Image (cartoon, grey):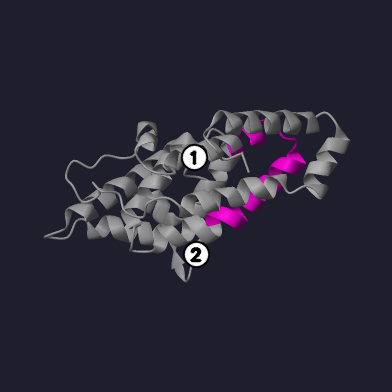
Amino acid sequence: PFLHLSSASGQLARDSLLLLVSLSSHHASVQTYIADHSNLTTILATGLGGLYSALPRSLGTADSASWHRLEAADCADIPGLGELVTSLELCCAVLQVAPPRVSAQLLELIQAGFLVPVVGQALVQDSGSVSSTAYLDLFLRVLSSPALLATWVRYILTATVDGSQILEVLIERIAASGQVGRRQDLSNLAAETISVFRFASSHFSYSRPWCPSTWRMLC
């Protein structure tokens, strides 16, 4: 219960967890216990969804011309955002010290328990689209694990949610911002979406076999 807290108790819990996971890289019995007999990776993955659901669905300045993309400093002003960023950083740290079996398990659970039911659903909804895209842009920039970053970007570029391909939805929002008489929030949404694409293109080759032709055109 302390893992996702921003207090000293939370930091102690995270440090203890990292020590345990690092031991599993050197002791097969610890690795087997974590992978087969504990819910450690499940707690890490499902905790992300709970923290995300507590985030504001609307950002007060999203329809203002002064809107800027979210930065780490904004975590202090947006309820729950700092805790979620901290938990994402913890997942990255775990992936850096965990043995392959534990890492693969955590990546699978993050996709199945967070990206698919939470992030994907949020991205294709019109309500709160600016905030969900702004959160995504920030999250991608704080991910320090190449494996987790690849999992996120691959999901965004290839996944379909309720019959809608996430990539196509994001492209359509960029196109909508160019229409005559566009609202300021649509312009801000397009700017956030382009920021996501720009970040992804700077970290991944166009030649990736899972990269669709529409993505190459944007690049």
Q: CA distance from mark 2 to mark 1?
A: 28 Å
Dominant SS of magenta comes to: helix
Using the image, tell me which numbered label, if any, was put on residue 191: none
Q: List the residue tagged with mark 1.
A: 83
Q: Position of residue 170 (x, y in %)?
A: 36, 57
Q: List the residue tagged with mark 2.
A: 160
Query: What kind of residue is marked 2?
Result: Thr
Dot 2 or dot 1: first in sequence order is 1
Q: Please tell me whether residue 74 belongs to the stretch shown in magenta.
A: no
Which span is picked out in magenta? 91-115
Q: Dot 1: few (<14), some (14–19), or many (≥20) neighbours within 10 Å?
A: many
Q: Please tell me whether residue 106 belongs to the stretch shown in magenta.
A: yes
Q: Nearer the viewer, residue 58 or 155?
A: 58
From this view, report whether residue 47 is shown above or below residue 12: below
Q: Nearer the viewer, residue 145 or 53?
A: 53
From this view, report whether residue 92 is shown above or below residue 184: above
